[in-house]
Image (tube, grey):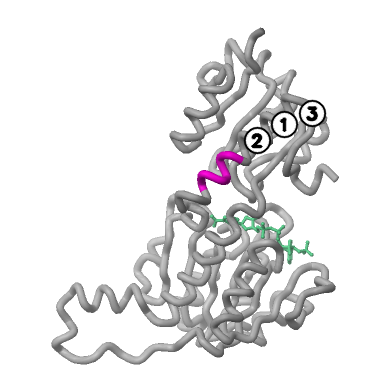
């Protein structure tokens, strides 16, 4: 029996690329002129676009298995309109992403990266490093108290932080105070951790008003998507001292990072590595492959995206 034809939308990790090739009749974008009519499934990652045009060009497409919990790279509306099933990889990355949020918050507040540069530059003999802020006992707002947001919150509790949050809907069993808007949340905390999904619904949710509500001693941590923050407004707020600091894993136009951010000692910048640990990426890869195998076996998904109902 011929093997199912699966399109690998780049970029995929070498391991996932190879795994799809071992299990299926794998095709890549360069093969589409002759193979588009055969493709029944797509494997993508959140850095590879699956738009309406691609979906429309694959008449037998039935499933999109995305490697990543965020799937703003996929036109889900177009997929569902065609009856194409979509899966993502929730839960398995919560710990890795949450600890990245804490790493950024600690790095910005304790000036870890700047202090490291101070030592390497041989400046310690000239005098002590300036005192810093601390995370312990501070007030931290979570914008997006979902799976990862909760994992961030429990870690902050261990630091003795006062946690509050904002979602569109109050979470009934959440043990933290609810703020009615992003601005209200920012106004009542020292640091704000952004962990909402990307996409049109959250575009520039963190705007100048939110940044100004955080204020000159405030710190913004973004481990969600670059699109959620008005990046020019963020750069201006940091440059003008209206915001105290920022820890960023994601950017508006990755892998481009604004020169204004690179020049600032108050910003700690990571190359979108929040889920990038060996065990977490292995679990994400397995869940992606399991979703694809499940759909091919009986038309069901282990972790369908919420829009599938
Ligand atoms: P969840 O769906 O569990 O949580 C998302 C939360 O955001 C929900 O509590 C939701 O509540 C809230 N939310 C959604 N839209 C809005 C809005 N417009 N305003 C306020 N709150 C909103 O997702 P996860 O925790 O699993 O993941 C969150 C996101 O983190 C992913 O979508 C992804 O983009 C990002 N991520 C980034 C990674 C990285 O490498 N940097 C790695 C993994 C994830 P409600 O619906 O009530 O508003």
**Looking at the magenta stretch, what is its main secondary structure?**
helix
- The residue under the point 42% across, 72% down is 267
Instruction: Give above or below for 273 relative to 65.
Output: below
In the rendered image, which quarter contains the N terminus?
Answer: top right
Q: CA distance from mark 3 to mark 1?
A: 7 Å
Extreme residue in the top direction: 1
Q: Quadrant of ligand 1?
A: bottom right
Per the rendering, the mark at residue 290 is 2
The span shown in magenta is 281-286
* Few, some or many residues within 10 Å of mark 2 (<14, 14–19, 20+): some
- The residue under the point 57% across, 81% down is 158
Task: Based on the picture, tell me whether residue 283 belongs to the magenta stretch.
Answer: yes
- Give the residue number, with chain letter if any, for mark 3: 299
Per the rendering, the mark at residue 294 is 1
Task: Based on the picture, tell me whether residue 19 belongs to the magenta stretch.
Answer: no
User: Could you tell me if the residues under marks 2 and 1 are in contact, i.e. CB atoms within 8 Å?
Assistant: yes
Q: CA distance from mark 3 to mark 2?
A: 12 Å
């Amino acid at each position: 029996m011929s093997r199912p034809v699966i399109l690998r939308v780049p970029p995929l990790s070498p391991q996932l690329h190879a795994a799809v090739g071992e299990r299926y009749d794998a095709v890549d974008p360069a093969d589409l002129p002759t193979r588009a009519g055969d493709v029944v499934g797509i494997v993508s990652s959140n850095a590879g676009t699956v738009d309406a045009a691609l979906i429309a060009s694959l008449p037998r497409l039935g499933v999109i298995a995305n490697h990543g919990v965020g799937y703003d790279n996929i036109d889900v509306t177009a997929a569902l309109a065609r009856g194409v099933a979509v899966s993502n990889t929730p839960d398995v990355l919560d710990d890795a992403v949450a600890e990245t949020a804490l790493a950024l918050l600690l790095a910005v507040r304790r000036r870890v990266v700047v202090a490291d540069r101070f030592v390497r530059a041989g400046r310690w003999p000239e005098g002590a490093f300036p005192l810093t802020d601390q995370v312990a006992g501070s007030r931290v707002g979570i914008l997006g108290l979902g799976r990862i947001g909760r994992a961030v919150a429990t870690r902050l509790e261990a630091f003795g932080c006062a946690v509050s949050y904002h979602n569109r809907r109050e979470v009934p069993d959440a043990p933290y105070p609810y703020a009615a808007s992003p601005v209200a949340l920012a106004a009542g905390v020292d640091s704000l951790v952004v962990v909402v999904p990307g996409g049109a619904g959250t575009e520039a949710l963190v705007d100048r008003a939110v940044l100004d509500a955080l204020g000159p001693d405030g710190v913004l941590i973004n481990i969600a998507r670059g699109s959620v923050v008005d990046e020019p407004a963020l750069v201006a707020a940091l440059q003008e001292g209206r915001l105290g600091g920022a820890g960023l894993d994601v950017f508006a136009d990755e892998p481009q990072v604004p020169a204004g951010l690179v020049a600032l000692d108050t910003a700690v910048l990571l190359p979108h590595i929040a889920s990038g640990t060996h065990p977490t990426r292995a679990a994400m890869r397995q869940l992606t492959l399991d979703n694809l195998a499940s759909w091919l076996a009986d038309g069901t998904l282990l972790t369908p995206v919420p829009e599938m109902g």
